Amino acid sequence: MSSIFLATIIVSTIGIVLGVGLAIASIVMAVPIDEKAEAINEVLPGANCGACGFSGCAGYADALSKGKTTDTALCAPGGNDVVEQIATVLGVAAGNIVPKSAVVMCHGTKANCDTILNYVGVQTCKSAAQLFEGPKACNYGCLGFGDCAHACPYDAINLCDGIAVVNPLACRACKVCINTCPKNLIELVPLYETKASVFCKNKNRGALTRKECKVGCIGCTKCVKACEFDAITIENNVAHVDPEKCTGCGICIEGCPTKCLSLITLGGKNIAVNQ
């Protein structure tokens, strides 16, 4: 028997043994397919944004299938259409998603907030923020390099006069922009409701805030005193509105000296911001 023929037999035998071993291992170690989770994952939008609180669409589908959560209304990008489809797969009553849109809580445009540094580094908010908190006079305001706009999977954010602006009609409330903003300026606001909002995050005292931005909150408490529903509080020198208590009456904005407090209505065909 030639050495070549013998080598061929040995290699072939080893191949057959390994093949059989892999086949047996694939059967023994196979992970059972969760058909319910697969069906739920099929109806999810596939954004994998994490807005549901899980690792992604597959994670949310697995949690629903295994009963780790019973809330069918956690997929904001999918909306109530997806909620109904999930409920159908699970055989339960459908939940309800309150439509929301992201809003950049800053009016520090080029006209309202000066630039004090000539920043020439990497043109991103994250990079600019690492150098003295950014080139703008206000260390808490929108830097306007568009990290949120680049991260948005729905092209819902644009840059306008030095700040980011969200189109609520395109926003799917996926929270990607919220997690991207290094200044933590972006919040979710209910659509089709009129609420008061404070477009400022400046925590400095009023005198310093006035020097930094024309429309910054100075913590004067006039809005707090004007509100009849105890919806406004002052925390760290800046006003905060509780959307659950706010009725949208607009009384609070009338006496705001810097006009940082606005009554906004998002949704439909109009995007109204009263300044």
Image (cartoon, rainbow, N blue to C red):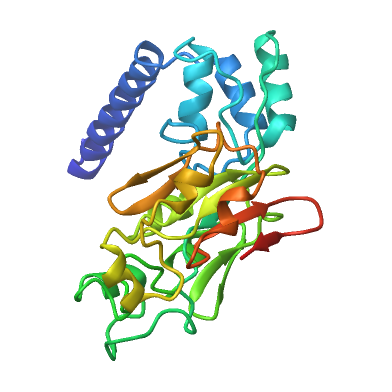
Q: Is the C terminus in the top left, top right, bottom left or bottom right quadrant?
A: bottom right
From the viewer's perspective, is residue 73 above or below residue 94? below
Where is 135 relative to 178, above or below?
below
Q: Position of residue 81 (x, y in %)?
A: 75, 31
Say left or right for 127 vs 230: left
Residue at 58% from the left image edge and 45% from the top image edge: 189
Q: Position of residue 39 (x, y in %)?
A: 64, 22
Q: Is residue 174 visible?
A: no
Question: Whole-percent x and y of residue 173?
Answer: 57, 45
Name the residue rendered at 69%, 8% in the picture. Answer: 91
> Which of the two residues, 157 or 77, is positioned nearer the viewer here?
157
Q: Residue at x 49, y 50 (%)?
A: 223
The quadrant of the picture occupied by the N terminus is top left
Q: Position of residue 271 (x, y in %)?
A: 72, 59
Q: Quadrant of residue 14?
A: top left
From this view, report whether residue 47 is shown above or below residue 93: below
Residue 139 occupies quadrant: bottom left
Q: Is residue 114 visible?
A: yes
Q: Residue at x 58, y 33 (%)?
A: 75
Q: Nearer the viewer, residue 10 or 80?
A: 80
